[in-house]
Structures are given as structure tokens and as C-alpha cells.
Amino acid sequence: MAFTLATWNINSVRLREPIVRRLLEEEAPDILCLQECKSPVEKIPLDGFRALGYGHMIARGQKGYNGVAILSRLPLEDVGDKDFADLGHARHVAARLENGVIIHNFYVPAGGDIPDRDKNEKFGQKLDYLTGMRDWFHSDRPEKSILVGDLNIAPREDDVWSHKQLLKVVSHTPIEVEHMAETQDAGKWVDITRQDIPDGNLYSWWSYRARDWDAADKGRRLDHVWATPDISNAGHSSRILRAARGWEKPSDHAPVFATFDI
């Protein structure tokens, strides 16, 4: 069984329904994982997606912020969610495909602007959330699983436009990168995107603040596709659809794709 999966922080699924539909029409991934849906589940515009063949959805939602959803052309079974750091946020949902593969869709807290938990509660919440993920993967080692989402950390030097200038900027600080590495190691997760594209600068997010985001190209790779070692060799054809960042009323994130033959 082969399927293509995409992950995309959409920054309001109702506001940006037209570009979600465009992605589904033009790229036709079998599964699309969305983050920051900013919608109660019952108000996600599923009818429009169903008309394009995406008749299955597993989601967790909140009014106005957070929210994660998995849209699929393939049947899905809801296998739950976790509320790491007890934030009461809709930031995780998991689904099982008929072939037994479990897909985890995550939206890790952004962490605010100040990389100091004593001065910024949100940064502490981000670190605690990652610690919760780490501890869960240690206690319940994942198998035959794919983890995707906006993890809000660009771990490598070539995952940001300037390693030196971003070392003290939330999303690329050493403590965040360390927490992410510990989380990844706890589940023995393989970074599929970098397995396929091992070298070179690679970004999935560009700030709205840039007058010309494309020309400035001050990006970060905040969106990830990981897989457990038992299926990591099945992952291939990774890519980031940079062009979507320039679509009408875009998200500040671009979709990240991978294909799996399982």
C-alpha cells in the first residue's frame, strides 16, 4: 500500500478553506494533516473537502485557536489524543489506517517571544510539552507510526536562514533543539524529510512580517515528518511546496509532503 501524506499549519481552516481545497485538488495527497485549525470540530468545512474525495476526518478543535485535523481519502480509526503539560489545548490527535500505521498529528506550542521560562510562561509550556512527549515515547515506545506536524522548532543549522542570528530566537535556541532531540530519540523517530533531503537549506515557514517573504527568504523548517525505524525505509519523495506560501491569503507555513510504501 502506497500513500502520500502532507502536513500543513493552515492558520485557520475556515478562513483558508479555498487554499486547502486548492491543495487537495492540485496535489491530491491521500492524507492531509492540518494544525492551528482555530475551529471547533463541528465547524470545520468538511463538506467541501468531502466533495473532493476526502470523506474521512479525525480532529480535535477549539474555538479561535489551536486545533488539529487529519483529512483522508483512506478509512481512519480514531485512536485518541494526549494533553501534554496539561494545557487543555487541542494540540494532538492520532489515527490508525487499515494497514495498521498510526499517524500522530502534533501542534507543539510556539513558545512566545522570550526564550526564558522564568520571564515567559509560554516558553516553559513549550518545553514541558516536549518533555511530556518524550516521557510518553519512553514509556510506550511507538511502532509502525508516523509523526507529523508543526513542531515549532528548526533543529539544524541549515533549517534556518541564519544559525548565528537565530540562536537566541525562539524556535532555534539550544534548549529547544535539545528538548526536540530528546523527544525524537525517545521514540527513535527518523526525520524522513532530512533522510530524503540530507543537505542544504530547507524551510517550511516564512514570517508575515517580511514585505517580500520570497525575496528575503528568511525561513525556518518548523514542520516535520518523522517515522519509526520499522517503517522509515518506506518513506520517500519528500518535498516542501514552497509555492503555497505565495497563494492568495496564505498561511505563513508551506505544506510538507512524503510518500510511504507500506
Image (cartoon, grey):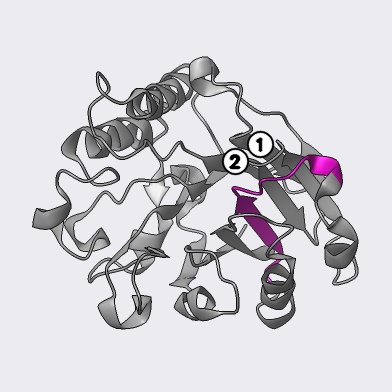
Q: Quadrant of the C terminus?
A: bottom right
Labels 1 & 2 near each other (Cβ < 8 A): yes
- Looking at the image, which is closer to me, 92 or 196? 92
Return the x and y of residue 251 as percentages of the image width and height. Answer: 54, 64
Which amino acid, mark 1? Answer: Val
Query: x, y percentage for residue 128?
Result: 39, 21
193 shown above or below 153: below
Q: Which residue is mark 2?
A: 104
Q: Quadrant of residue 81?
A: top right
Query: In the rendered structure, which amino acid carries the disc numbered 2?
Result: His
Question: Which residue shows up at 45% across the image and 71% down it?
Answer: 240
**First-in-chain label (1 vs 2):** 1
From this view, report whether residue 87 is shown above or below residue 202: above
Taking the magenta stretch, the answer to whether it contains residue 24 is: no
- Tag 1's secondary structure? strand
Name the residue beneath numbered marker 1.
93
The range drawn in magenta is: 29-42
Displayed quadrant of residue 28:
bottom right
Of labels 1 and 2, the one closer to you: 1
> Residue 75: x and y, percent?
83, 52
- Residue in the image at 27% along x and 77% along y: 216
Direction from residue 122 to residue 168 in the image, left or right: left
Q: Position of residue 215 (x, y in %)?
A: 30, 83
Q: Residues within 10 Å of mark 2 (few under 14, many from 20)?
A: many
Viewer-proximal residue among 123 and 93: 123
User: Outermost residue, left direction?
Assistant: 164
Describe residue 220's horizontal placement relative to residue 83 as left or right: left
Residue 38 colored in magenta in the image: yes
Left or right: 114, with 47 as reference point: left
| SS class, disc 2 | strand
For the point 45% across and 72% down, the residue is 239
Number of numbered callouts drawn:
2
